[in-house]
Amino acid sequence: MTGRPCRQLARRSRSRILPRSVVNAFVGFVTIAGSLTRCAPAADQPMKGPVETMEAPWGPFARQCATTRVSHMTQRWRRGDVEVGDNYQTCMGFSAMPSGHDAAEITASVGNPDRPSSTVILRILRQAGGATRKAASGDTGLLAQGSDVPEAAQVLARDIGLTSPQLISPNETLELPVQLLIPFPLETVLSCRPDGGHRDHGRDTLVFSCRSNQKVHTDRLDAQVQLAGVEQIDIQSGVRLSSVLAGHLSGRSRSGDNAAWLSANNGLLYRREMEFE
């Protein structure tokens, strides 16, 4: 199951059964991840040796959406414990132009699909080998128009994929950043090990099993965050194609700088999916 049906499932799923591969990340918290495991990429080709990545700056990538579901259990009269939650989604459409023989100027239109007025334009330069930077003064071509939010362009440059050439061995451990919305941005780092190869839209990919267990302290959040799931990376470009992560947040949060801290005990479900041209 791929594409739009998976995104629709992420919005309406109410499964109470967790996939075994992520149950430890919840510390007993039961949420909606079970049905979504059918959407997760799975390695079906064993790694026979090291795999070299990032020989091209970009690929036939058209649009990527990321959805974070934040949920908790509550007691309802006559129904017992039920799961309630909210979805936070952002999507970005891509256009790319060659910049020399080993780089691409990438424009990303980023926003909430339900709020067209929220769309911002970000521009980055990405080279073969992964070196990436935001648009800067003195650039030419598309980059000369700059980004609506340069700081967000810098985050995109960091998170869109690997940032340096990698010779990935079967026992390699990669650290990958991930940003969830809860509804404010939550950044954490995944520790990932390769499961093997896969084919997606005719492209060779690597699928990784990933975990994170971190204490996060910001002006909005003070909590332990646990995640587990899979990441899929395009071998030729190093771009991250998809993610399915589930986990738990336990601690406290607040809605603003002057708001009171409140207890937080939430399940997390994160899904990212790339659409191809």
Image (cartoon, rainbow, N blue to C red):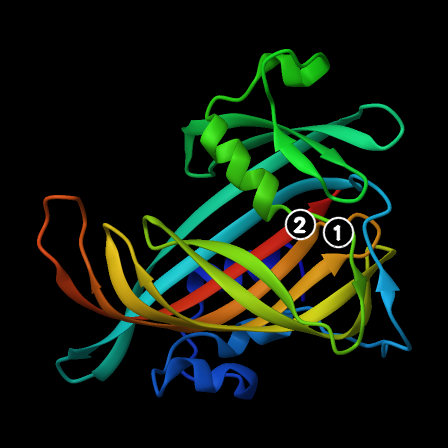
Report the side of 6 relative to 117 (left or right): right
Graded by Cα atoms within 10 Å as few (under 14), some (14 to 19) or many (20 or more), the crowding at tag 2 reads many
* Dot 1 or dot 2, earlier in sequence: 2
Look at 72% across and 35% down and name the residue there. Answer: 126
Whether 51 is drawn above or below 272: the answer is below
- Compared to residue 187, the image places residue 215 above or below, namely below
Q: Is there any visible trace of residue 110 in the rendered image?
A: no
For image coordinates 66% across by 50% down, the residue present is 161
Query: Which one is in front, 45 or 212?
Result: 212
Residue 243 on image: x %, y %? 60, 62
Secondary structure state at the residue bearing disc 2 = loop
Q: Left or right: 166 with respect to 145? A: right
Mark 1 sits on what residue?
A: 238
Quadrant (top left/top right/bottom left/bottom right) for the C terminus: top right
Residue 213 against residue 105 in the figure, above or below: below
Kind of residue indicated by mark 2:
Gly
Crowd band around label 1 with a 10 angstrom C-alpha radius: few (<14), some (14–19), many (20+):
many
Contact between labelled residues 2 and 1, with CB atoms less than 8 Å apart: yes
Query: Which x, y percent locates residue 6?
Result: 58, 61
Reading the image, the residue beneath label 2 is 161
Q: Nearer the viewer, residue 98 or 2?
A: 98
Mark 1–mark 2 distance (CA, rounded to whole Å)? 5 Å
